[in-house]
Image (cartoon, rainbow, N blue to C red):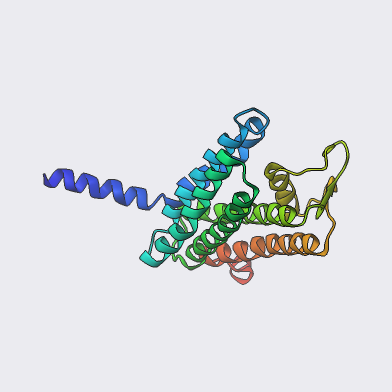
């Protein structure tokens, strides 16, 4: 019996040390798979399954303290329920409600994970995975915000006729636009038109640049490297 308890304790400790592994895996899974499933008849369902996995792994990633778990669950459950209800019923109001809770969930998860990354005393593989997860969560947070803005105020974004012939945008369109903006690539095939949309795009580009700078500074500090020490 004692041996089984020890084995269980080891498995739990190992799972605890890989919290960000699961979150990063779910984020990469969404970004890799969504272009190949959204065009099919089961596209909305497949996309919702992938986003639901992120909600689950996101709750687990912030499960260090009871308060964090409670907040994550209070944001994640409505996002999950409203999302699936929208897939089933197609009611636009449910899509807006899902976007609000999903945006808050992504932002909250990114902040908690970032806090863990910046305050940890020892850089591990899971710490690096957490840092990458934050970057991807930033992109998904802004993508959700863009979709919400467009649903509330149609015409907030414009696109080249070849890219968007019917004049409508889908969430995958905003995933693409968000990460292009986050990386400050600026292809120009999708353009924010209204002041609100331009403000969001500006803030995302700035946040992406600041995040990379802060993260590099944190990793350098953790490794104990400095230009003076390097020159000696």
Image quadrant where residue 196 sits: bottom right
- Quarter of the image with the C terminus is bottom right
Residue 138 drawn at (x, y percent): 62, 56
Instruction: State the residue at coordinates (60%, 34%).
Output: 33
Residue 106 drawn at (x, y percent): 56, 56
Q: Residue furthest top?
A: 40
Which one is in front, 45 or 227?
45
Residue 95 drawn at (x, y percent): 62, 49
Q: Is residue 216 left or right of residue 201?
A: left
- Quarter of the image with the N terminus is top left
Which one is in front, 115 or 168?
168
Instruction: State the residue at coordinates (44%, 62%).
Output: 122
| Residue 136 seen in this snapshot | no
Instruction: State the residue at coordinates (88%, 39%).
Output: 161
Residue 49 drawn at (x, y percent): 52, 39
Q: Is residue 129 left or right of residue 150?
A: left
**Height in image: 151 above or below 30?**
below
Instruction: State the residue at coordinates (24%, 50%).
Output: 9
Q: Is residue 104 left or right of residue 40?
A: left
Which one is in front, 152 or 28?
152
Q: Residue furthest right?
A: 161
Image quadrant where residue 172 sits: top right
**Height in image: 1 above or below 220?**
above
Q: Is residue 154 left or right of residue 36?
A: right
């Amino acid at each position: 019996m004692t041996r089984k308890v020890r084995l269980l304790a080891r498995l739990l400790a190992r799972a605890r040390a890989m919290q960000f592994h699961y979150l990063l895996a779910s984020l990469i899974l969404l970004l890799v798979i969504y272009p190949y499933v959204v065009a099919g008849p089961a596209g909305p369902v497949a996309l919702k399954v992938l986003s639901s996995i992120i909600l689950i792994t996101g709750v687990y990633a912030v499960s260090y303290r009871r308060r964090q778990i409670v907040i994550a669950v209070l944001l994640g459950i409505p996002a999950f329920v409203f999302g699936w209800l929208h897939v089933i019923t197609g009611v636009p109001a449910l899509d807006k409600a899902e976007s609000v809770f999903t945006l808050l969930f992504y932002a909250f998860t990114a902040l908690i994970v970032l806090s863990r990354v910046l305050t940890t005393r020892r850089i591990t593989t899971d710490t690096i995975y957490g840092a990458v997860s934050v970057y991807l969560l930033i992109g998904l947070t802004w993508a959700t915000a863009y979709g919400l803005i467009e649903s509330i105020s149609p015409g907030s974004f414009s696109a080249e006729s070849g890219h968007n012939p019917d004049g409508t945008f889908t969430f995958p369109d905003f995933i693409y636009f968000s990460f292009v903006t986050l990386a400050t690539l600026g292809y120009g095939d999708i353009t924010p038109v209204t002041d609100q949309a331009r403000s969001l795009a500006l803030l995302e580009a700035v946040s992406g640049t600041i995040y990379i700078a802060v993260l590099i500074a944190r990793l350098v500090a953790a490794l104990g490297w400095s230009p003076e020490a390097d020159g000696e």
